[in-house]
Image: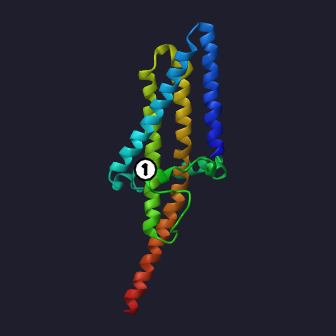
Amino acid sequence: MKLYLKILIIGLTSIIALNIVFSLINSYHIGEMFLYLLLAIAICGIMSVVIMVTTRVLPEKVFSPYRRIFRVNSKENKLYAKLKIKKWKDKIPELGKLGGFAKNHINEPSSPQYIFKFLTETCIAETLHIYSILFGGLVFIFLPSQYLFTISIPVFILNGFLHLLPVLIQRYVRPKFLKIYQHLLEKEENIEEISAKTC
């Protein structure tokens, strides 16, 4: 959480400083600049909420971890190892509980149904964050062109970066939980076979 807040504070402080300098050089009204900055932040925030609600309305099968789009290959896994996601992933806030399923703690590690639900939630979270990055581009439509380089582009980059981190985390943890899920299914099948033979 601290890492996330640091990125957010440093990013917003840099954008504000850039705009103050820009306003002084170009004689723009600082109050107007702050209003447009708030508008840009509001656009990104509102779109994230709209996308979160939309993903919850869609059927869960849309977010199956077996769909090609959610698969993670070995090259991607190596990239995540180089990025040392394991070291910093817990410093990024996990807001799955807002959607009804927290992913920061495994409540039922031996339940294949629970693990599959966990996997589905990683796909939902990934989708939500990717679309939040894309729809952050609305700042380019709603803000005047004079703020393109001082507000629109910086806010778009900051919003994108803050949403990209959770996407990487979802894709990093999913293969591990897919292995756990497969193992639990095999274990369940073996128990059923033994039970059938003893009956």
Identify the residue at horizontal 59%, vertical 7% (top origin): 26
Q: Quadrant of the C terminus?
A: bottom left
Element carrying mark 1: helix
Q: Residue furthest bottom?
A: 199
Residue 55 on image: x %, y %: 38, 47
Residue 186 on image: x %, y %: 45, 74
Residue 76 visible? The answer is yes
Identify the residue at horizontal 47%, vertical 76% (top origin): 187
- The chosen color scheme is rainbow
Apparent side of residue 115 relative to residue 25 in the rendered image (left or right): left
Name the foreground residue: 38 vs 53. Answer: 38
Identify the residue at horizontal 43%, vertical 35% (top origin): 46
Residue 75 on image: x %, y %: 56, 49
Tell me the quarter of the picture where residue 30 sits: top right
Tell me if mark 1 has few (under 14), some (14-19) or many (20+) residues whose alpha carbon lies within 10 angstroms of its own.
many
Q: Residue furthest front?
A: 31
Name the foreground residue: 115 vs 9. Answer: 9
Apparent side of residue 26 relative to residue 55 in the rendered image (left or right): right
Identify the residue at horizontal 46%, vertical 48% (top origin): 125
Q: Amino acid at mark 1?
A: Ile
Looking at the image, how many numbered discs can be counted on the residues? 1
Residue 85 visible? The answer is no
Residue 115 to residue 152: above or below: below
Name the residue tied to disc 1. Answer: 124
